[in-house]
Amino acid sequence: MTVLPVPDTAIIVVAAGSGTRLSAGAPKALVGIDGRSILRHALDGVFAASPMQVIVVAPAGFEGEAEAELLAAAGDRADLGRVVTGGSTRQLSVAAGLGALWGDVTTVLVHDAARALTAATQIDAVVRAVTGDAGVIPVLPVVDTLKRVDGATVVGAVDRSELAAAQTPQGFPRRPLEAAYATALASGIEYTDDAALYAASGHDVRHIAGSERAFKITTPADLERARHLLSAASAPGVPVIGIGTDVHAFGGEGDLWLAGLEWPGEPALSGHSDGDAVAHAIVDALLGGAGLGDIGLHFGTSHPEYAGAHAEVFLARTLDLVTEAGWSIGNIAVQFQGNRPRFSTRRPEAEQVLSNALGGARVTVSATTTDGLGFSGRGEGISVTAIAMLIPAS
Ligand code: CTP
Ligand code: MG
């Protein structure tokens, strides 16, 4: 008999909520997205991550259903899984999960089953980020403009650059988390999430980048979104395409940056970052094709860290996003319209730089003038169209 190493990490998947806001007539975790339930999808992500103890916290009376989903998702890792019964609040459900941890576990992740499409890469990233005493949470930047209101009156603006939207899994060192839970349960205080509970015990919490796909299914519209994402990704082997366009005017500072290259002596394009309209159109084509929104969502003015950034930075991050969402890049074709720069002599160099930034994907770029017509013909700016082909990874 082989003795498998006992994992030092555990994930508690809380699935015991009733799903009042979804109101689908069953506990939320057992509601179907496609042919599979919310819980099953969440567990598919968990078991695609590195091996860890998996504790599913089920709604009382539905332990058998949860067990069946666990076995179906676990494959040959069934020994790592276990179902416990949840409590009347999320906090009590997590506490029930903590009670089932194996002795060797030193790192604990707490994950909402409702974040059903969370990628295994996000789970592993949280595991890796838990070091020392600090907790770790994945977050997304806040994209909406936020207001403070009092009754019907808007009383002020909120600086969203100071804010982030928390996701799961949230990761913690085991003993301090258990102590923090004991303190919280004794105090009777209900915290909004595990990170808040952990911080209330005086510990630091750090953040890493979350992902659009880890959104929480709360309302019927969220369930539709999950269905849409899965149907987009579920035709095995069938590629999809995405399209992106970008227009920038000349009038920026310094030298031109275009197609990943610096063009000394050429007039610069204006815009957030370096104005590289070729790179921006590629980003939109990739994000759009992958169903991940667009450049404004991931790199807009709410992300000051990208001010002045060049193509490699945008493209590398975009490659991460589409890879994490389960796509590989087939090819990218780009054409820009503009009188200058004279592109053909540097085409091979540009294609190489763009391809390198995208993990070696095939990128081709062409340029054309417009016979003096339109803004590009008048030399006022550049207009770019990019098409990307994406292939589902498996
Ligand atoms: N959860 C839990 N036990 C509870 C309440 C919630 O395990 N007593 C879990 C849910 O199953 C979910 C996660 O905590 O995976 C986040 O909670 P939420 O999205 O609010 O789910 P529900 O409480 O089920 O939904 P609602 O608030 O709409 O009733
Ligand atoms: Mg709830």
Image: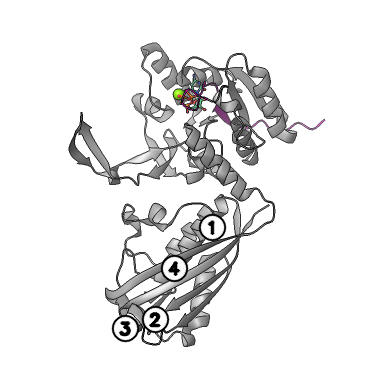
Front in this rendered view, residue 64 or 230:
230
Horizontal relation, residue 205 to residue 68: left or right: left
Q: Quadrant of residue 188?
A: top left
Magenta residues?
1-23
- N-terminal-most mark, 4 or 2: 4
Q: Which residue is mark 2?
A: 338
> What distance separates the C-alpha of mark 4 from that of mark 1?
15 Å
* Rendered position, 280 above or below 19: below
User: CB atoms at circles 4 and 2 under 8 Å apart?
Assistant: no
- N-terminal-most mark, 3 or 1: 1
User: Which of pointers 3 and 1 indicates the residue nearer the eye?
Assistant: 3
State the predominant SS element of the stretch in magenta: loop
* Rendered position, 350 above or below 48: below
Q: Quadrant of residue 338?
A: bottom left
Local secondary structure at mark 2:
loop
- N-terminal-most mark, 3 or 4: 4
Q: Which residue is mark 4?
A: 279
Q: Is residue 311 magenta?
A: no
- N-terminal-most mark, 3 or 2: 2
Do we see residue 216 in this rendering? Answer: no
**Horizontal and vertical percent for residue 169?**
50, 35
**What's under tag 1, amino acid-wise?**
Gly
The disc label shown at residue 289, or none: 1
> What distance separates the C-alpha of mark 4 from that of mark 2?
15 Å
* Rendered position, 349 above or below 23: below
User: Which of pointers 3 and 2 indicates the residue nearer the eye?
Assistant: 3
User: Which of pointers 4 and 2 indicates the residue nearer the eye?
Assistant: 2
Q: Is residue 21 magenta?
A: yes
The disc label shown at residue 378, or none: 3
